[in-house]
Amino acid sequence: MMAAASELNKSCPMMVDQDTRLDNAIALPENVFQYNYTLVNLTKDELDLEKFTAYMEPQITNNVKPNPDLKIYRDNQVTMKYYYKDKNGEFVAKFEVANKDYK
């Protein structure tokens, strides 16, 4: 996983969409792979965190399940984490997709 993070990080930071930047990815203990994002146009105070979470959580889970690029992570029971901060670097939300969620 460290090699995968290093390879991905060669392309970072990269804009995912007009509001979201992938800053980097890291391999963490206990079989965890984390993506770190910044919401480049928003502050935490400008977000409705409940709506953000309600929207993002199923989007992320539904992307991890069928994504062929993530099959190796699913096969190895890796927990995927998605960490979001605002344009000022303040923590916004973290989402997790564990092996039990792949099913």
Image: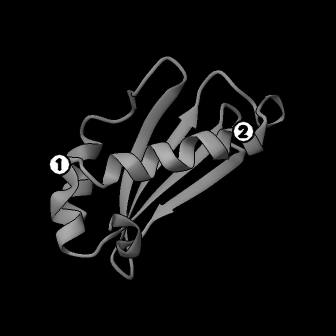
| Residue 84: image location, x then y, percent | 58, 45
Q: Is residue 73 left or right of residue 31?
A: left
Give the residue displayed 54% in from the left and 52% down from the top. Answer: 83
Give the residue displayed 39% in from the left and 33% down from the top. Answer: 13
Give the residue displayed 34% in from the left and 36% down from the top. Answer: 12
Which residue in the protein does label 2 denote? Answer: 51
Above/below status of 33 relative to 24: below
Instruction: Please identify the quarter of the rendering in which residue 38 is found.
Output: top right
Q: Nearer the viewer, mark 1 or mark 2?
A: 2
**Residue 81 or residue 71, whichever sits in front:** 71
Instruction: Please identify the quarter of the rendering in which residue 86 is found.
Output: top right
Which residue in the protein does label 1 denote? Answer: 69
Three-letter amino acid code of the residue under disc 2: Lys
Q: Is mark 2 on a helix, strand or loop?
A: helix
Instruction: Please identify the quarter of the rendering in which residue 11 is found.
Output: top left
Tags 1 and 2 touching, CB below 8 Å: no
Q: In which quarter of the image is the N terminus?
A: bottom left
Give the residue displayed 15% in from the left and 63% down from the top. Answer: 72
Above/below status of 41 relative to 84: above
Three-letter amino acid code of the residue under disc 1: Asp
Q: Is mark 1 on a helix, strand or loop?
A: helix
**Residue 65 or residue 37, whichever sits in front:** 65
Q: In this view, does 54 lie to the left or right of 38?
A: right
* Residue farthest bottom in this picture: 30
Disc number for residue 1: none
